[in-house]
Image: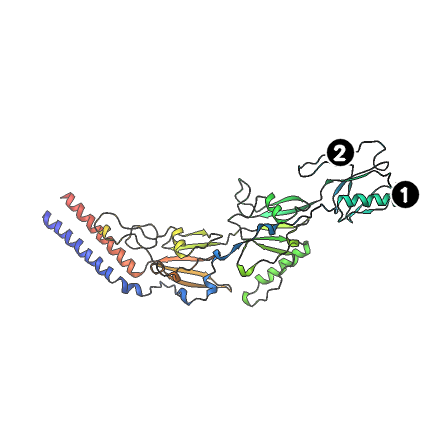
């Protein structure tokens, strides 16, 4: 009786193995058929190039020197500079030592004289003379302008004047930097709040503003920087334009104003060779009230489902990822690691499937749901087994793609047959052990 039971188990295993081999031999014919599972899709070769996406590796990095201004060889005065001025018998008595001011930073020498600010109109208000215009002058030229004013007013005589003009404090520009990415300062996981910085003259540019708030944009930031200028009325106009665009029922038929907002300067950090940015040095110079905005690329994600574990995944910023890399990144498996024979023999060498389960063959039918520029979406059908040898099947994953991995009928039947073989094999071992 024990022998008959053992023989029955062996026969069942043999029959199951034959069934697996028959299914495996017929997989090529089954594989050629389309099992859409209610998701009609098109092949990549039938899509226009615009929907396939362009390689990010073709982009080039912008020169960092374009983010800063070129300072003049000699400092030029303007409104809000604070000068140190000594004029004997006018600002300071005869034989009296002028006051000395030591700067807070080490990039500026000590200044001598009494503090006198440059007014908004670019002039100095000094005793006994009319306002002296110094805007655009160097310190040496400003000294001569003050001397001429006092000699022309007959307050001082030529050759008997003692005048000293130095720089106590450079003018500063107060700007706001808003960074939404996680890069930059330590122990900051998400910005979203602004930081106000005071930038001295000839350092009031984008590069210095970034340096003061954590450096260049991080990898989770978009490849662009926005400089927002203008007042409240400009903001109202900007919001009105965007509201009109968003309210349009047919986005592609809505004419876009050009430029959409002249008070916003867009600076791309990476660009395609034929799209070289055309901003000027004047565009990157910041003034009081300007806002430097670095948005996060929260929407640069793709989503997975089906035989893949559901989730969202952030796309790389500066390089490409195709469908094979995306499936691997999501924890899926590209092609099976074995033939299934090792499982049938009980050695446990079968490969995991897309979801990590132990099956003979992994899922190979991938549906990519891709959003179109004018709304809606197009499903793209990818054969992962063919993509291993056919580059045209390895399309690039784009932001907001949804990847749904499915088993073909052949793969489902093959894996089910392997499970039957494995069950019978284990049952046969168990029966022999009990007997």
Residue 71 position within the rendered picture, expressed as x and y whole percent measured from the top left? 67, 48
Report the number of discs: 2
Residue drawn at x 75%, y 41% is 82
Q: CA distance from mark 1 to mark 2?
A: 28 Å
Provide the residue designation for mark 1. Answer: 154
The numbered mark at residue 100 is 2
The numbered mark at residue 393 is none
Label 2: few (<14), some or many (≥20) within 10 Å?
few
In the rendered view, does 400 fall on the left or right side of 226? left
Q: Is residue 118 visible?
A: no
Residue toward you, 306 or 332: 332
Label 1: few (<14), some or many (≥20) within 10 Å?
few
At numbered mark 2, what does the secondary structure look like: helix, strand or loop?
strand
Residue drawn at x 59%, y 64% is 256
At numbered mark 1, what does the secondary structure look like: helix, strand or loop?
loop
Residue drawn at x 24%, y 59% is 24
In the rendered view, does 92 fall on the left or right side of 243? right
Residue toward you, 251 or 166: 166
Task: Give whichever of discs 1 and 2 has the lower sequence position.
Answer: 2
Residue 261 position within the rendered picture, expressed as x and y whole percent measured from the top left? 63, 59
Residue 1 position within the rendered picture, expressed as x and y whole percent measured from the top left? 9, 48
Q: How is the image coloured?
A: rainbow
**Residue ranking furthest to the right:** 154
Q: Quadrant of the C terminus?
A: top left
Q: Are marks 1 and 2 in contact (CB under 8 Å)?
A: no
Q: Quadrant of residue 169?
A: top right
Residue drawn at x 86%, y 46% is 130
Q: Is residue 199 above or below residue 420?
A: above
Discs 1/2, front: 1
Q: Is residue 68 visible?
A: yes
Residue 280 position within the rendered picture, expressed as x and y whole percent measured from the top left? 64, 56
């Amino acid at each position: 009786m024990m022998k008959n039971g053992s023989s029955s188990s062996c026969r069942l295993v043999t029959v199951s193995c034959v069934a697996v081999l028959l299914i495996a031999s017929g997989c090529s014919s089954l594989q050629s058929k389309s099992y859409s599972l209610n998701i009609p899709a098109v092949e990549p070769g039938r899509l226009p190039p615009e929907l396939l996406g362009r390689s990010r590796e073709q982009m080039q990095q912008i020169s960092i020197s374009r983010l800063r201004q070129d300072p003049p060889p000699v400092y030029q005065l303007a409104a809000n500079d604070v000068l140190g001025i000594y004029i004997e018998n006018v600002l300071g008595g005869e034989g009296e030592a002028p006051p000395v001011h030591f700067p807070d930073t080490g990039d500026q020498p000590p200044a001598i004289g009494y503090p006198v600010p440059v007014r908004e109109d670019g002039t100095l208000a000094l005793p006994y003379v009319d306002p002296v215009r110094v805007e655009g002058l160097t310190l040496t030229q400003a000294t001569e302008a003050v001397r001429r004013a006092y000699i022309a007013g007959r307050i001082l005589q030529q050759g008997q004047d003692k005048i000293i003009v130095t720089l106590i404090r450079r003018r500063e520009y107060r700007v706001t930097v808003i960074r939404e990415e996680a890069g930059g300062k330590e122990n900051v996981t998400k910005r979203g709040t602004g930081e106000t910085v005071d930038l001295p003259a000839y350092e009031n540019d984008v590069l210095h503003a970034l340096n003061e708030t954590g450096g260049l944009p991080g990898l989770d930031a978009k490849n662009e920087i926005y400089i927002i200028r203008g007042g409240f009325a400009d903001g109202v106009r900007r919001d009105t334009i965007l509201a009109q665009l968003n309210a349009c029922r047919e986005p592609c038929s809505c004419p876009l104003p050009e430029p959409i907002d002249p008070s916003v300067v867009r600076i791309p950090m990476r660009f395609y060779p034929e799209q070289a940015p055309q901003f000027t040095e004047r565009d990157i110079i910041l003034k009081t009230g300007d806002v430097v905005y670095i948005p996060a690329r929260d929407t640069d994600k793709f989503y997975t489902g089906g035989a893949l574990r559901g989730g969202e995944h952030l796309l790389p910023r500066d390089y490409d990822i195709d469908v094979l890399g995306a499936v691997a990144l999501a924890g899926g498996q590209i092609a099976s690691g074995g033939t299934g024979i090792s499982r049938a023999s009980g050695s446990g060498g079968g490969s995991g499937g897309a979801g990590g389960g132990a099956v003979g063959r992994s899922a190979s039918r991938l549906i990519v749901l891709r959003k179109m520029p004018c709304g809606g979406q197009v499903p793209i059908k990818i054969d992962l087994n063919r993509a291993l040898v056919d580059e045209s099947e390895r399309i690039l994953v784009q932001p907001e793609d949804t990847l749904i991995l499915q088993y073909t009928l052949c793969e489902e039947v093959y894996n089910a047959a392997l499970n039957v073989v494995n069950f019978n094999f284990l049952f046969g071992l168990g029966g022999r052990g009990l007997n």
